[in-house]
């Protein structure tokens, strides 16, 4: 110990894994988990890469850990649903080398489609849960989670939430400890589950019992009792909120939230008049405490289940107190929803789909913003890969003019089996694969279509067209994503086709480094030709605003020359700035810490 | 209703920085937090990543002091709220504590996809609206100044940072070290000039630490 740094929870988790001697790390990008691997890839001792999906990542991690090495697997909460199959089975055999899976939950649904509390999945799998609450704990708990994993031969879940993952703070770091691999005996009686699972099943309960005993004394949990009447039992970031609001209380800080130290917790309850159980998400701790006989606890009835906690939410719930504030209420302000970037290739797609008035089964990625105004052209969005299956169902139900929309990374993640199904069931779906060459929403992580890996090393480029043809789709076209009329024609043609059709709509994400490094020739509105028909506004490009004379004006510093507004202008009033008599603005790019 | 006794008050300073994706909100908040740590404080900084780069509203919480518990600033507990843009200043003004100050970059970024209704409701008069609520407003034309004086409006964030540095209990030299550390060399000179411009503006208001400045009634400082 000794070095001090300022790290986010995710960076500290990566550091903790590195210090623990992890040699293999994999996962699939998903907010708020992505930065763990992005940080870990900077440590040369760790073999770090993005997998095609969370199930693949998890299974790779199993292979590595069973072979004796320490492995880390990361994903967002819904990612664990994809990996649930191996997650539920792996605990039966248990692990040799340390195995930790990070489940990054998202109370408040900042960037997720649901608010599931993955502690229940871990309990279902009999997997112990470690929950850090600060960046320092992220580092230390991660390191200790590997010790726990090897001591009990069990996979361990490190559960974070958006705030623990993204909050930055001071962290004391240490050095890396190389850990020799645990011996691997490829014994089918242990690792071949269907036949021998029945013998392993009671051992799983034995291990859980031993973990429950360990939970009573583990340093993951901390009790501070000074004889005060109010007690607080809390986990993760909720511990910090509670301390802000109830500084004059005794605390039972839970770092190991499964199995719970029920003996200690019940004793803590007996020693206090009232005990607040403060946990975001579901009443995971509370229900187990009640089942164990605690009667003086207050939890979800008071604080509620939905959404994120905050200090003021706890204060108001406890006795209607509010922090003194300069304004009694917030001042109404129009919303500013996220939107497609300037020049984003998805803009043309949703403009076309909205005009064609088709029913759109969407998927998970930036293109979910196609559901927002002004497009409102994405009607169903459930989970990764769902669009194609949903479209098959829509068609089977008689919704003829329906279209599935999926990104390249999401298609590879869980879209391929559904496309095989469409071919096999001879369902004439229309599928648009929006291929922008990257995993855009989570921050441009490379995937098999990118041509390089997360370390920047060249990798084979997956041929999407060949893949789609290989599963049996006959009607396949590739379209430039900035060509409005070509997209429209492709959709109409696919809808008319009597078999499954795929249009690969291609054009790189504007945020990719190679796109940002281009020499641009921004467009400009020639006011002498503009008739104020306002057609260019329709695509809602952030670079086009209403200028001083009421005419549309293009922000030359923002324009990336996607030319879509030019295609919309019937009066040829949108022209390249260069060679048009206008001064070229200098556009140095100060490193302004643009948002990730 | 009574006020919550805050155990950590008054040793915690809380700064909320708001703006639009791409304005450099996170850099501002990270530099403040790191400067506070360099000055020997405990400090936290938090925001939500994800869709903010898609032109959405961004806000980041910085807290520093002896020991910080909640990284989220409770509503009504911010010593300073910074709006890098008028609408976002209005949106987060309710985080101010009584006597706190709100720094508003007199710059407008109308929401695009929210429809014409949102555009027509854009608070062009944000500063007077905030003042009419009795708030102490420090208005800075940071983007305009950065464009005019430095030829680049994108360093408005560092200009504002310079101004904030004169209002926070952190020694001046620490800020300069951090800029050197966090800004790539080819942009360092530009950022240094932006920072100095902000410091000069802050100096013209009087170099009051936020805690003291914020207890004074609204002096209506306009730059």
Image: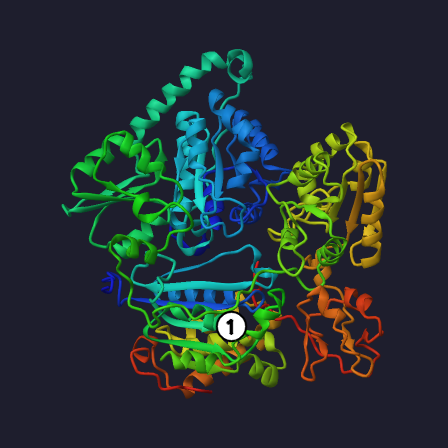
The correct choice, above or below, for A536 with respect to A439 in the image is below
Q: In this rendering, does residue B119 appear at all?
A: yes
Depth check: give the residue in front, A512 or A148: A512
Q: Residues within 10 Å of mark 1 (few under 14, many from 20)?
A: many
Q: Residue furthest front?
A: A398
Q: Quadrant of residue A447?
A: top right
Q: Position of residue A342 (x, y in %)?
A: 69, 64
Circle 1 — which element?
helix
Q: Please indicate whether residue B8 sits to the left or right of residue B189 in the image.
A: left
Q: Please indicate whether residue A391 sits to the left or right of residue A102 in the image.
A: right
Residue at point 62%, 78% (across, down): B152
Which residue is denoted by mark 1 in the rendering? B87
Q: Position of residue A513 (x, y in %)?
A: 69, 58
Q: Quadrant of residue A45?
A: top right
Depth check: give the residue in front, A8 or A161: A161
The correct choice, above or below, for A240 with respect to A56 in the image is below
Q: Position of residue A3 (x, y in %)?
A: 41, 53
């Amino acid at each position: 110990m000794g070095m001090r740094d300022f790290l986010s929870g995710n960076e500290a988790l990566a550091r903790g894994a590195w210090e623990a001697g992890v040699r293999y790390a994999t996962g699939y990008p998903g907010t708020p988990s992505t930065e763990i691997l992005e940080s870990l890839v900077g440590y040369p001792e760790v073999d770090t890469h993005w997998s095609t999906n969370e199930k693949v990542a998890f299974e790779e991690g199993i292979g590595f850990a069973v072979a004796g090495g320490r492995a880390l697997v990361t994903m967002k909460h819904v990612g664990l649903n994809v990996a649930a199959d191996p997650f539920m089975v792996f605990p039966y055999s248990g692990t040799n080398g340390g195995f930790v899976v990070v489940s990054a939950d998202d109370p408040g649904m900042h960037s997720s489609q649901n608010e599931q509390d993955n502690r229940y999945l871990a309990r279902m799998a009999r997997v112990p849960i470690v929950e850090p609450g600060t960046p320092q704990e992220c580092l230390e708990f991660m390191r200790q989670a590997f010790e726990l994993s090897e001591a009990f031969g069990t996979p361990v879940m490190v559960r974070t939430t958006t705030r623990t993952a993204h909050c930055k703070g001071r962290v004391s770091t240490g050095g890396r400890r190389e850990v020799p691999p645990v011996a691997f005996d490829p014994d089918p009686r242990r690792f071949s589950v269907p036949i021998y699972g029945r013998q392993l099943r009671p051992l799983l309960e034995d291990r859980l019992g031993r973990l429950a005993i360990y939970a009573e004394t583990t340093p993951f949990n901390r009790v501070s009792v000074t004889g005060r009447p109010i007690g607080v039992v809390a986990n993760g970031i909720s511990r910090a909120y509670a301390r802000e609001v109830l500084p004059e209380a005794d605390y039972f800080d839970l770092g190991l939230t499964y199995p719970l130290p029920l003996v200690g917790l019940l004793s803590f309850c007996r020693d206090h008049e009232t005990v607040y159980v403060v946990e975001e998400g579901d009443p995971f701790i509370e229900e187990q405490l009640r089942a164990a006989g605690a009667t003086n606890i207050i939890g979800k009835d008071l604080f509620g289940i939905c959404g994120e906690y905050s200090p003021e939410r706890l204060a108001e719930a406890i006795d209607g107190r509010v922090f003194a504030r300069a304004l009694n209420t917030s001042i109404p302000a129009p919303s500013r929803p996220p939107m497609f970037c300037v020049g984003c290739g998805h803009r043309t797609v949703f403009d076309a789909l909205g005009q064609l008035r088709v029913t759109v089964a969407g998927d998970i990625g930036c293109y979910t913003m196609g559901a927002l105004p002004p497009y409102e052209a994405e009607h169903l969005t459930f989970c990764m890969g769902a669009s194609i299956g949903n479209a098959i169902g829509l068609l089977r139900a008689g919704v003829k003019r329906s279209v599935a929309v999926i990104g390249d990374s999401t298609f590879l993640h869980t879209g391929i089996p559904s496309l095989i199904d469409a071919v096999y069931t001879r369902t004439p779906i229309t599928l648009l694969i929006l291929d922008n060459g990257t995993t855009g929403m989570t921050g441009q992580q490379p995937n098999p279509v990118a041509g390089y890996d997360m370390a920047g090393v060249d990798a084979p480029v997956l041929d999407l067209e060949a893949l789609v043809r290989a599963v049996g789709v006959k009607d396949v076209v590739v379209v430039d994503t900035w060509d409005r009329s070509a997209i429209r024609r492709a959709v109409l043609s696919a809808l008319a086709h009597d078999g499954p059709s795929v249009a690969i709509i291609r054009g790189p994400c504007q945020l990719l480094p190679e796109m940002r490094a281009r020499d641009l020739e921004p467009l400009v509105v020639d006011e002498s030709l503009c008739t104020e028909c306002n057609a260019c506004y329709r695509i809602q490009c952030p670079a086009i605003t209403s200028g001083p004379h009421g005419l549309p004006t293009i922000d030359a510093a923002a324009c990336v020359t996607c030319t879509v507004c030019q295609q919309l202008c019937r009066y040829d009033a949108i022209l390249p700035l260069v060679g048009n008599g206008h001064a070229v603005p200098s556009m140095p790019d100060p490193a302004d810490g643009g948002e990730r | 209703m009574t006020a919550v006794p805050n155990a950590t008050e008054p040793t915690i300073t809380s700064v909320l920085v708001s703006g639009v994706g791409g304005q450099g909100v996170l850099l501002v908040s990270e530099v403040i937090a790191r400067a506070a740590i360099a000055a020997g404080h405990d400090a936290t900084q938090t925001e939500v990543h994800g869709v903010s780069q898609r032109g959405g509203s961004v806000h980041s919480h910085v807290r520093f002091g002896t020991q910080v518990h909640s990284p989220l600033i409770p509503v009504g507990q911010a010593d300073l709220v910074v709006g890098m843009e008028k609408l976002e200043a209005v949106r987060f003004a309710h985080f101010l504590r009584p006597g706190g100050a709100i720094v508003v970059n007199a710059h407008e970024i109308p929401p695009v996809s929210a429809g014409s209704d949102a555009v027509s409701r854009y608070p062009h008069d944000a500063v007077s609206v905030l003042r009419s609520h009795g708030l102490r407003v420090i208005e800075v034309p940071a983007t305009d100044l950065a464009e005019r004086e430095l030829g680049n409006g994108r360093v408005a964030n560092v200009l504002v940072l310079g101004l904030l540095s004169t209002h926070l209990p952190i020694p001046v030299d620490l800020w300069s070290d951090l800029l050197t550390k966090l800004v790539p060399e080819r942009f360092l000179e530009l950022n240094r000039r932006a920072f100095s411009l902000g410091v000069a503006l802050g100096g013209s208001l009087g170099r009051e630490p936020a805690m003291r400045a914020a207890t004074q009634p609204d002096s209506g400082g306009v730059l």
